[in-house]
Amino acid sequence: MTTDKPGYIIRKARKEDIPTVMYINKVSLPENYPEWFFEEHLERWGEAFFVAEVDGKVVGYVMSRVEYGAPFVVEGTFVKKGHIVSIAVLEQYRRRGIGRSLMEYALKALKEVYDCREVYLEVRVSNEPAIRLYERLGFRKVRIIPMYYLDGEDAYLMAREL
């Protein structure tokens, strides 16, 4: 699936995108992962791993996975849920709707391809632009996770029904 948006394209990630995705992760976020972590997510949940391109250059990504467990927002004792593991857009390409589009594609795939009933993510309590985006996408703050990040900052666990 490749979709043209004003000024950018959203498409499924490919193996050859991993080095660029890792670079975007490294320069955009303090939390970084080893190459095998990205490759495993692409291999296991590649239908919900997307990149954004501007003029043929990958400038952002969203990486998701599927889990089973106690729900955060839907009824039930055990549910299939999506987890937005990481999302980042290079700073010079932000505020163009790229992050929102990446999230929309991931949410759609988690629901339609993987049959998840809800989706959740963690976000730094200080990351107000991301929190606003997630709230506009229907996420709500479920709880605070104390000292979630390596630097000791708390995270909001945010979730929504799919």
Image (tube, grey):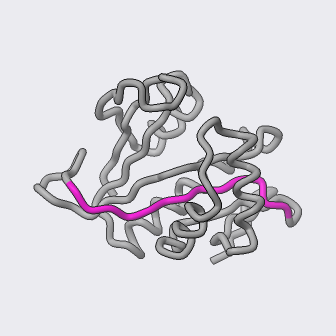
Q: Which residue is drawn at 76% across and 51% down?
A: 23
In the rendered view, tell whether residue 33 sits above or below residue 114: above
Q: Is 47 contained in the magenta span?
A: no
Q: For this rendering, which residue is in front, 90 or 151?
A: 151
In the rendered view, tell whether residue 134 sits above or below residue 15: above
Does residue 113 appear to the left or right of 15 in the view shown? Answer: left
Q: Residue at x 65, y 46 (%)?
A: 88
Q: For this rendering, which residue is in front, 156 or 133?
A: 156
x, y percent for residue 139: 39, 41
How many numbered marks does the figure carry? 0
- Quick one: quadrant of the N terminus? bottom right
| Range shown magenta | 57-69
Does residue 152 appear to the left or right of 60 in the view shown? Answer: left
x, y percent for residue 50: 62, 64
Q: For this rendering, which residue is in front, 2 or 44?
A: 44
x, y percent for residue 146: 36, 25
Does residue 61 appear to the left or right of 155 in the view shown? Answer: right
Q: Residue at x 35, y 32 (%)?
A: 141
x, y percent for residue 145: 35, 30
Q: Residue at x 77, y 54 (%)?
A: 59
Residue, far left: 77
Main SS, magenta residues: strand
- Quick one: quadrant of the C terminus? bottom left
